[in-house]
Amino acid sequence: HELNNPLATISLRTESLLEQFADGDPKQHALKIIGQEVERMGNLVGNLLQFSRRSHQQISTIDVYKEIENTLNFIEHYLCSRQINVVREFADTLPNIHADRQQLRQVFLNLLTNASDAMTQGGTLTLRVAAGQTEHGAGAIVIEFADTGTGIKPEDLLKVWEPFFTTKGEGKGTGLGLAICRRIVEEHKGTINIESEVGRGTTVRITLRAAEGEGHGTHSV
């Protein structure tokens, strides 16, 4: 609150001042920059809180298909504005999983946003969902996010999970998104890994244990 409240005040005052200047006025341009930077600072504070806080999980039975579609609906405008074509490669039916719904959506949202940001000239984002196995042979759900973006340099692949490391330009990323994703997935006893090739794209793969005997999700074409 010690940071969020002052930022909220600055944001409101900036919006109020913007209304006092006509379009094209240099002062309006400067105020817009202030507003954008305040928003970026607010996002950074939010990410820092999320990264440092160990929230109590609200575990329920989750249909992975529904959660992916709900997240896609939320970010649809952003994907369209960046000319991202979404391809779904989903198995017809899959076991449900036990997970915290909000945390799972946060992982999906972070990965979808990262993938779209990597495709600066547009591209294809392929989502694959299939049955698989954990490292110990238990039934699992495997979820892949594959983009056709710029890819990640081999020397950076070892660093992408580190807090505050980012390959995005200055002011365009906090470097906490993947670190948060990894923590959430591991708290769900799952695994997450990345494969990437510069100039061809990146694939992020998540494996989560299936909730045996808890019903199945069905993908509707």
Image (cartoon, helix red, strand yellow):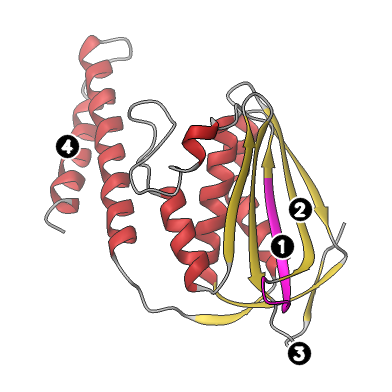
Q: Which residue is mark 2?
A: 128
Q: For the residue marked with disc 2, what is the amino acid?
A: Arg
Q: Are marks 1 and 3 in contact (CB under 8 Å)?
A: no
Q: In the displayed structure, does residue 95 sit left or right of residue 117? A: right
Point 79% across, 62% down: residue: 130
Is 143 colored magenta in this rendering? Answer: yes
Disc 4 from disc 1: Cα separation: 47 Å
What is the distance, in whole Å, between disc 1 and disc 3 at their CAs? 18 Å
Is residue 89 found inside the magenta-colored segment of the image?
Answer: no
**Mark whose residue sits in front, 2 or 4:** 2
- Sooner in the amino-acid sequence: mark 1 or mark 3: 1
Badge 2 element: strand
Q: Which residue is mark 4?
A: 13
Residue sitting nearer the eye, 219 or 11: 219
Instruction: Give whichever of discs 4 and 1 has the lower sequence position.
Output: 4
- Labelled pair 4, 1 in contact (Cβ < 8 Å): no
Q: Principal SS element in the magenta part?
A: strand
How busy is the neighbourhood of tag 4: few (under 14 within 10 Å), some, or many (20 plus)?
few
| First along the sequence among labels 3 and 2 | 2
Q: Amino acid at mark 3?
A: Gly
Sequence-wise first label, 2 or 4: 4
Residue under label 3, please give it: 213
Q: Is residue 129 left or right of residue 199?
A: right
